[in-house]
Amino acid sequence: MTAFDSTALSVVALIGLLAASAFFSSTEIAVFSLSRAWLDERVAANDGRASILAELRDDPHRLLVTLLVGNNVVNVAISSILAVLLADRFSGGVAVVLTTVVASSVVLVFGEILPKAYGLGHAEEWSLTTARAVWVVERLLLPVVVVFDVVTRRAGAMMGDPDIEEPYTDTDPTHAAGGEGAK
């Protein structure tokens, strides 16, 4: 493979990984901003996507671990690929600085800030749209998710806070929906 071919392939991989980062970030904020009451209404209306989402939300810690594992894997891969691309073109120290600045900037803007704004603004529909994909990701990453799930639950319990995500999950059925319906 020529240098151009590998560079083009790397750029395509970076774009795909950035899209995956955006997916995980937008889904995280969307799913955790929903009220349980809204979700229960959708399940009662026989929305199959809502049933999948409710199953995922039944264990918010595992759901959070799944989304964070997925997001961190793709963000580290972005940095790794970018480091290889830049190391071929710049000296070691310069390549490290450029990788840090470029990867951080691109991931923050296109993998975190803009996707989270989108996810928050379209929480209800986006959560339903991504529910099946998150369910699949959870199954694909199951061994890794289980390890981090157990480790973080135990670490949280040792710190006296076993349910760190609980303040961010709405279990009060009287609370207004967190997505578009709350505007």
Image: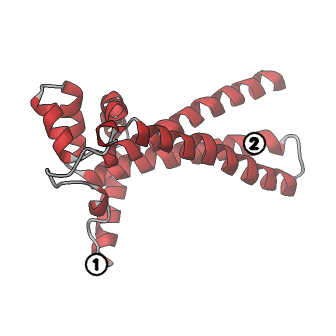
Q: Quadrant of residue 56?
A: top left
Quadrant for the N terminus, please: top right
Residue 54 horizontal/vertical position (percent): 20, 40
The residue at the point 61 percent across, 48 percent down is 108
Dot 2 surroundings within 10 Å: few (below 14), some, or many (20 or more)? some
The residue at the point 19 percent across, 25 percent down is 48
Amino acid identity at mark 2: Val
Residue 166 to residue 83: above or below: below
The residue at the point 82 percent across, 45 percent down is 87
Residue 24 horizontal/vertical position (percent): 45, 41
Camera sees residue 2: no
CB atoms of marks 2 and 1 within 8 Å: no
Q: Which residue is mark 2?
A: 84
User: Viewed as shown, does residue 113 lie left or right of 181?
Assistant: right
Q: Which residue is mark 1?
A: 160
Which residue appears farthest toward the front when viewing the image? 183
Camera sees residue 159: yes
